[in-house]
Image (spheres, rainbow, N blue to C red):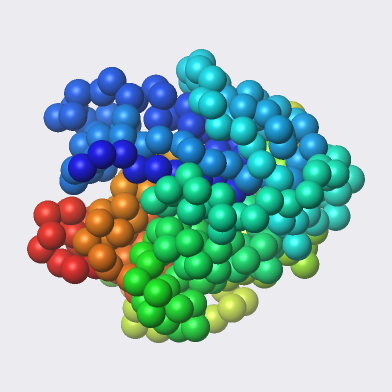
Amino acid sequence: MGSVRVAIVGVGNCAASLVQGVEYYKDADPAAKVPGLMHVQFGDYHVSDIEFVAAFDVDAKKVGLDLADAIGASENNTIKICDVPSTGVTVQRGRTLDGLGKYYRETIEESAEEPVDVVQVLKDKQVDVLVCYLPVGSEDAAKFYAQCAIDAKVAFVNALPVFIAGTKEWADKFTEAGVPIVGDDIKSQVGATITHRVMAKLFEDRGVVLDRTMQLNVGGNMDFKNMLERDRLESKKISKTQAVTSQIRDRDMGADNVHIGPSDYVAWLDDRKWAYVRLEGRAFGDVPLNLEYKLEVWDSPNSAGVIIDALRAAKIAKDRGIGGPVLSASSYFMKSPPVQYYDDEARENVEKFIKGEVER
């Protein structure tokens, strides 16, 4: 079926892990099981079929660089898993809008170059899928790029917690344009959200009443530094919270009994994230039963494989002429999809989608 031509918005740590990951697994056996991917061969597309053809950023230290160099530039500090040869793709100056918060502006220099015509670039480069990796809180900027995807007839993967696929307004826009979207807010391979979801559901499945829970996250990348600006956090907290509480379907736990969100920035952690999770419940005889755990991950590689699958799902939808939210892929790969399923159901739906047994 050819390649999956991808454009990236926001060349940060997540983009670095994505680009490295495609290089790392380009020669993987199509039948092999590798960490972090549903399939090496996802429908018609192997990992090696993903081709990066355009990239946009606003950081002066990244704009103008080859993508292979930009992924290691400026404040990017994720773990290196392989060398990436020159891509021939120059990072272009995107639109800023609300993409730079207070702490970003204190840390990086905004490019003085004129922003490019994003829609024209997407058309000229014959992009299949645009992946949006903008910083948390980039409401206007994320919606600008979503509209660019619609205007250029390019599938959209929304990796950040700005609600696009999950809103009727934007879902209708994508549907009417015949453009697929997978969103919103990427769910890592094994991160705080997925483990917290699973443990909350385990409590319920085993008859333990979950009364209270909390999840505190600290990290040392620009994502965490940006999230020190609490005004940019509203959608992030909602996204992470509903991802967990959606597993408790018979009651509302109450806002005071659920605390989930980023907590602090610790520079020496680099792109590592430490999550502290606690669940408090009542077992047989209303006897207290509490669970507490700590998760340590490299944040960006933890989501890269999920994005590789999401990109290929979006391309399959585009090939099939499907517009609007791809519900199967969104529910399995994203924290805040239009429809929440249990994770085992969601995975099964993606397998059916790959085989063409369900439309979306």
- Position of 68 relative to 208 (above/below): above
- Position of 270 relative to 122 (above/below): above
Residue 325 at least partly seen: no
- Position of 106 relative to 101 (above/below): above
The front one of 264 and 104 is 104
Q: Is residue 299 left or right of residue 2?
A: right
Residue 45: percent from left, percent from top: 24, 40
Residue sitting at 31 percent across and 52 percent down?
315
Residue sitting at 71 percent across and 45 percent down?
93
Residue sitting at 19 percent across and 68 percent down?
359
**Residue 34, quarter of picture:** top left
- Position of 59 relative to 70 (above/below): below
Residue 175 at least partly seen: yes
Residue 269: percent from left, percent from top: 68, 32
Q: Is residue 140 left or right of residue 60?
A: left
The front one of 200 and 127 is 127
Q: Is residue 266 left or right of residue 147?
A: right
The front one of 316 and 122 is 122
**Residue 271, quarter of picture:** top right
Residue 112: percent from left, percent from top: 85, 44
Q: Is residue 230 left or right of residue 20?
A: right
Residue sitting at 47 percent across and 67 percent down?
150
Picture quarter with the C terminus: bottom left
Residue 312: percent from left, percent from top: 31, 47
